[in-house]
Image (cartoon, rainbow, N blue to C red):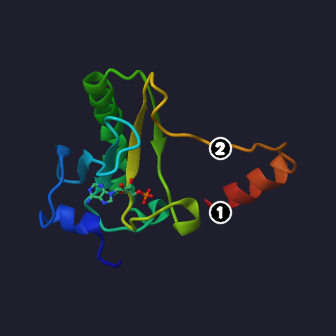
Amino acid sequence: MAETVFSKILRDELPCHRVYEDAHVLAFLDINPISRGHTLVIPREPAERLEELSEEAAAAIGRVLPRIARAVLAATGATDWNLLQNNGRPAHQDVFHVHFHIIPKHADGSGLGVGWKSSKLQDGDTLAKEIAAKL
Ligand code: AMP
């Protein structure tokens, strides 16, 4: 995996505004927040994309995400928020080390804007079976 800005943060070679850390996970404030409290949660394990992450590292993040989210909400006064996780350049990933964004939605409208164009599910039975067969 290529070196990223997050690898440097993990090795303390770059500063960050740290909000949580344990043996597997680090959380810190996003340097260009889209709303107050925008926080990044990353595994210490090096992996570019979520599907490459070990079950242990994924479980370690999953365990602490609700707790970190509660702390972000309590500190900022927000009640609503989004969890964003991008994989791949076309999916808006800029830093190629797995990370989860905790993004509070504030009363002033700041937060994640989602342009969501939905369609009608066409081949649900077939598709669900195809996906299940790959698990
Ligand atoms: P993504 O588009 O999902 O890859 O998001 C990468 C995020 O990392 C962006 O929201 C950046 O603002 C954030 N970011 C990049 N460099 C730093 C840094 N040194 N400290 C904190 N956040 C950063």
Residue 135, by quadrant, is bottom right
Q: Which residue is drawn at 65% across and 44% down?
A: 115
Q: Mark 2 points at which residue?
A: 115
Q: Residue at x 24, y 68 (%)?
A: 7
Query: Ligand 1: does it lie within 8 Å of the C-beta at label 2?
Result: no
Q: Name the residue under label 1.
A: 134
- Residue extending furthest toward the front: 108
54, 86: nearer the viewer: 86
Q: Which residue is drawn at 31% across and 36% down?
A: 37
Residue type at tag 2: Gly
- Residue extending furthest toward the right: 122
Left or right: 121 as drawn, with respect to 85: right
Q: Is residue 80 above or below residue 62?
A: above
Please provide percent x and percent y for residue 125: 83, 48
Do the residues under discs 1 and 2 have CB atoms within 8 angstroms? no
- Res 109 label: none
Left or right: 108 as drawn, with respect to 67: right
**Disc 1 element:** helix
Mark 1 against mark 2, which lies toward the viewer? 2
59, 17: nearer the viewer: 17
Please provide percent x and percent y for residue 126: 83, 54
> Mark 1 vs mark 2: which is more N-terminal?
2
Please provide percent x and percent y for residue 99: 38, 55
Residue type at tag 1: Lys
- Residue extending furthest toward the bottom: 2
**Disc 2 element:** loop
Tell me the crowding category of disc 2: few under 14, some 14 to 19, or many 20 or more residues within 10 angstroms, Cα based: few
Please provide percent x and percent y for residue 89: 53, 68
Q: Distance between the residues labelled 1 and 2?
A: 29 Å
- Residue extending furthest toward the left: 12
